[in-house]
Image: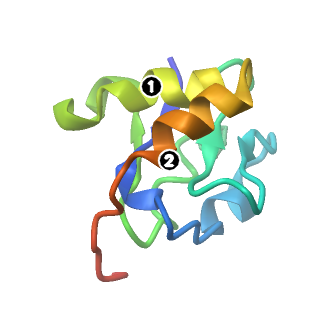
Amino acid sequence: MTYVIGETCIDVKDKSCVEVCPVDCIIGGDEDRMLFIDPEECIDCGACVDPCPVDAIYAEEDLPAEWDEYTAINKEYFADRESARAKVAVKVAIPVEPA
Ligand code: SF4
């Protein structure tokens, strides 16, 4: 199991999650439109969920169905960053009001 970052992170990248992750497994560079969780490193603690102002982070089994592909996209980022970026590049950011 892992936690997964979904679509509302795109073009937001608040990074509150990065500050609380105890194993530093949430990654994203300036060139990325969103952040990604490394499923091999995530210890399923859930600490990143509440700090996210756009409700982008879910336990894998609770991920909204329309975000299904983000489980693979998060994982792929750590194997092939360009491929994962290409999948995110075609996404239209969801307009969200920070909580
Ligand atoms: Fe990091 Fe815990 Fe969130 Fe996994 S669930 S990404 S270990 S803060």
Instruction: Report the residue at 48% width, 65% height from top.
Output: 52
- Asked whether 42 or 9 is in front, the reply is 9
Q: Residues within 10 Å of mark 1 (few under 14, many from 20)?
A: many
Is residue 43 in view from this perspective? no
Q: Report how many numbered discs are placed on residues in the image.
A: 2
Question: Which part of the image, by quadrant, shows the C terminus?
Answer: bottom left
Placement of 72 over or under 99, stated as above or below: above
The label shown at residue 71 is 1
Instruction: Report the residue at 73% width, 57% height from top.
Output: 31
The label shown at residue 82 is none
- Asked whether 99 or 10 is in front, the reply is 10
**SS state under label 2:** helix
Q: Coloured how?
A: rainbow
The reply to whether dot 1 and dot 2 touch (C-beta < 8 Å) is no
Mark 1 vs 2, N-terminal side:
1
Asked whether, in this view, residue 12 is left or right of residue 35, the answer is: left
Q: Residues within 10 Å of mark 2 (few under 14, many from 20)?
A: some
Placement of 92 over or under 22, stated as above or below: below
Q: Which residue is mark 2?
A: 89
The location of residue 71, given as percent across then percent down, is: 44, 25
The location of residue 20, given as percent across then percent down, is: 70, 59
Instruction: Report the residue at 61% width, 42% height from top.
Output: 36
Give the residue type at disc 1: Thr
